[in-house]
Amino acid sequence: MRFSARVILGLSLLVLAFTGCDKKAQAPNIRVTGFHANPAPTGARTGAVYFNLENLGQGEDLLLGGSSNVAQTVEIHQTLEKDGMMTMQRVEQLAIPAGGKVEFTSGGYHVMLIDLKKALAEGESISLDLDFKISGKVSLSVPVQAMGGALKAMEHMDHSQMNMAPEPVPVDGGIDQEQLDQMEQADESPVEPSMGNMDPSKMDMGTEKKHEGH
């Protein structure tokens, strides 16, 4: 009996160990990238934070909300179009599937900072904690960047593949720049005079002098 009890206990511990390993293998693995907040002037009530959420694990996780040092309340919102009007609604929780990715962008999902405690000045950073059901709290230091700041990345693009030729520019009279250039080139070209269009009064009517014979 004593031997049987030991065997049963050992098997139970082995089952628990395998169960724990299986749960760990199916756990989510959340990664947050591209996070930034929009500037907000003094007196503004709300702000917005954008980022990309990627689940590299084998199990689903849920984003439940968050908190920040610059806002009284932090909520997940989604921008939707209804009857031709853009509206925002609160999302209580957002599923991040295993191997999935969710983008938080303008016009879609975003984190709303409500009742701001201070202005959000470009160049500074704010603290943001995201709360997940399984992964727990993920803390971020979010830079404040203007929307137009993303355009600076174009300076590092490969312009060799872009068509940089300017389009014809319209000018007065309905003539485009290309036609104007052709006209200017024509003006610079030598023109053969036409006898039919010449004014006889302006023609040199002199004749060769006759040499008198001796």
Image (spheres, grey):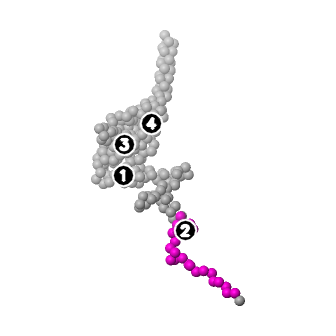
Looking at marks 3 and 4 on the same chain, the residue that comes earlier in the sequence is marked by 4
Tell which tag, 3 or 1, sits nearer the viewer.
3
Q: Are marks 3 and 4 in contact (CB under 8 Å)?
A: no
Instruction: Tell me the mark number nearer the camera, choosing from 2 and 4.
Output: 2
Q: Mark 2 = which residue?
A: 194
Residue 66: image location, x then y, percent? 35, 40
Which range is magenta? 186-213
Total numbered labels: 4
Give the x, y percent position of residue 68. Answer: 35, 45
Looking at the image, tell me whether mark 2 or mark 3 is earlier in sequence order.
Answer: 3
Residue 123 coordinates in the image, percent (x, y)? 41, 54
Three-letter residue code for mark 3? Gly
The image's mark for residue 26 is none
114 with respect to 35 (left or right): left
Q: Is residue 138 magenta?
A: no
Question: In front: 125, or 122?
Answer: 122
Amino acid type shown at disc 1:
Pro
| Dominant secondary structure, magenta | loop
Q: Which sits earlier in the primary sequence, circle 1 or circle 2? A: 1
Q: Nearer the viewer, residue 182 or 123?
A: 182
Q: Is residue 63 above or below residue 159?
A: above
Gap between marks 2 and 3 measured at Cα: 69 Å
Q: Residues within 10 Å of mark 4 (few under 14, many from 20)?
A: some
Pointers 1 and 2 in contact (C-beta within 8 Å): no
**Residue where numbered disc 3 is placed:** 107
Residues packed near mark 1 inside 10 Å, few (<14), some (14 to 19) or many (20 plus): many
- Please identify the quarter of the rendering in which residue 92 is found: top left
Asked if the residue under mark 1 is in contact with the one under mark 3, i.e. CB atoms within 8 Å, the reply is no
- Quadrant in which residue 84 is drawn: top left
